Image (cartoon, rainbow, N blue to C red):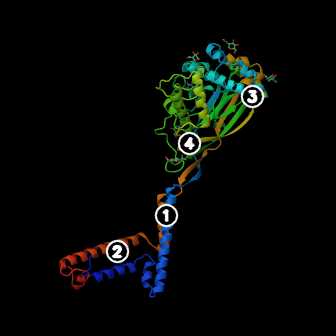
Amino acid sequence: MPPKKPGTMASLWTLRNDIQHTTAHGIPNIFRARHWFRRSLWAAFVMFAFCCAIWQCMEIIMTFYSYPLHEKMRLISDSKLMFPAVTICNLNSVRHSSLKKNLALNNTFLDFCLAQRWNSTGYPGAARDATRCASSFSKFASEFNRLSDEEKLDMGHQLEDMLIFCSFHGEPCNTSFFSGFINYKFGNCYTFNSRMRTDLRGRSIISEPLNTTKAGFIYGLHLELFIQQIEYVRDITHSAGIRLLVHNHLATPFPEDEGVNIPPGTETDIGITKVVIRRLKHPYGSNCTDGEGIPNFYHDLYGFKYTREACKRSCAQQSIMKHCGCSHWEFAVPPGLQYPKCNFSSPATRRCLELYEYKFAQDILPCHCPLQCKEELYSLTVSGSQWPATAFLDKFSSNLRDKGGQLRAIADIPQDMRDNMLKVVVYYQKLNYEDISEEPSITDIDLFSSVGGLVGLWVGISLCTLAEFLELAVNVVLIVAHACLSGSSQGPASPGPMASREGPPI
Ligand SMILES: *[C@@H]1O[C@H](CO)[C@@H](O)[C@H](O)[C@H]1NC(C)=O
Ligand SMILES: *[C@@H]1O[C@H](CO)[C@@H](O)[C@H](O)[C@H]1NC(C)=O
Ligand SMILES: *[C@@H]1O[C@H](CO)[C@@H](O)[C@H](O)[C@H]1NC(C)=O
Ligand SMILES: *[C@@H]1O[C@H](CO)[C@@H](O)[C@H](O)[C@H]1NC(C)=O
Ligand SMILES: *[C@@H]1O[C@H](CO)[C@@H](O)[C@H](O)[C@H]1NC(C)=O
Ligand SMILES: *[C@@H]1O[C@H](CO)[C@@H](O)[C@H](O)[C@H]1NC(C)=O
């Protein structure tokens, strides 16, 4: 919108007018001031404010790009909570009776190891003996690993023998609620509410997720277990009971590293509280991942979700496969990869394994294993009491006699019952859970409003002011264009700035 008679001077006057009346406070004041001193003071102040605004905006923008975060904790109440998966493993991995049939396995035990145990610190060579004991277990684990899954399964404790009584939320349950897996240290482990479709032997099981609609002891999972101490192998198991883990059904359970031990002769009550942790992905500091593109053999084998522990173990297995040429018994083997199982008796393999076990223990393998983005933890409150109580013994022993088999044999002697039977109850203490999530400290909108606020505070510039400056720029362009046009229409005879003063250009 060019003015009707825009001589260059007139145009410059409009520009000056524009600047004087800009809504960026401060600038008009420079023009308004009459005295040069005031004018320069105003100019200096405007410059100063401008620098401050730029400096503080830079600070804010730099903070934003360092991606700060904070943690927010909420307590969420729910009328219904999914019951977690509960994994139980007998502390003894193979049954003594089945061991007798397997000569190779029987020969791996070093009696020596047991005899010297109690004396292991007080004589020269103690350290060497401790190493021999550790490698005695490795030798056993390596031999055990060579068996087929079917054989391993048969050698361990059977859920059918162990589970005497089961109830959940007041309803009876049975072995068809349990799936399982084979662990190198504890043999057969059984998982309640795992939501897998089949159990260890491939029979279909109840896979519907189980919910809790009431907190408290009676609405929990009640298990009575027979741990079969008569089947314990003294060379591999020095304590009796079961290992119990409470975990999300998609998280890989590692009974050798997690969980609590439940002793026989007790009723152990485990109150659980759920905690959900959510982390932010890159570029935020925790760099969490959902596991895409990261090898996770536990997912390939069992369908478990990504966790950092599963990643570390998969990575260790990969290193061992690559450098030792065989698969370690301690870690999952991906289906379809044809590697022989490690033979601990061969010296070269043994040295290689020991090196990589050391590296795994020291966490110096070159693994990229970020934390998982969503994690569900269960904090346990464990308490115990004697079980069965003396007054209840008679009734209990007659119950056991009715069941027959090995149970009949222990039913007569109270000490035998207390050595072999245990009860465990797992229940939600309350139906609310803690949700701890990471949140960005500065969002895009926060950044925008902070910068806007700072600029407004120091130099009084808003978006509308920016639009004014844009208009100013357009005006300048127009004026320059006019000047050039009128200059060329006057011809080469009257060049220079004087020309535009003389007449209307258009
Ligand atoms: C198994 O080993 C033990 C000693 O470690 C021995 O007494 C027993 O006879 C062996 N059993 C068989 C079947 O070889
Ligand atoms: C401990 O071991 C040493 C050497 O083997 C032996 O002389 C000593 O009697 C042992 N002590 C006990 C208490 O068994
Ligand atoms: C286990 O319980 C389910 C339902 O509660 C029942 O259908 C099934 O027959 C039971 N299985 C055995 C082996 O008792
Ligand atoms: C538990 O809740 C889930 C979803 O809320 C539902 O799909 C499932 O059927 C429930 N389980 C039972 C046993 O009702
Ligand atoms: C997160 O990832 C970035 C690059 O992907 C890396 O520079 C940074 O060190 C990682 N931070 C952590 C805590 O792993
Ligand atoms: C394991 O290694 C030992 C020693 O090298 C050897 O005697 C044994 O036959 C090997 N076992 C198998 C199953 O290859």
**Marks 3 and 4, how far apart at CA:** 37 Å
Numbered disc 4: secondary structure: strand
Cα–Cα gap, marks 4 and 2? 56 Å
Q: Nearer the viewer, mark 3 or mark 1?
A: 1
Outermost residue, bottom direction? 35
Judged left or right of residue 165, residue 40 is left
Disc 3: CA contacts within 10 A as few (<14), some (14-19) or many (>=20): many
Give the CA separation, mark 3 to mark 1: 71 Å
Q: Is mark 4 within 8 Å of ligand 5?
A: no
- Compared to residue 164, the image places residue 470 above or below, namely below
Question: Which of pointers 4 and 1 lies earlier in the amino acid sequence?
Answer: 1
Q: Is residue 250 visible?
A: no
Q: Is residue 288 above or below residue 207?
A: below
Count residues near mark 4 (Cα–Cα under 10 Å), then give few for <14, some for 14-19, many for 20+: some
For label 2, the residue is: 472
Q: Earlier in the sequence, mark 3 or mark 4?
A: 4
Determine the image quadrant of residue 366: top right
Query: Where residue 403 appears, x then y in whole percent?
Result: 67, 19
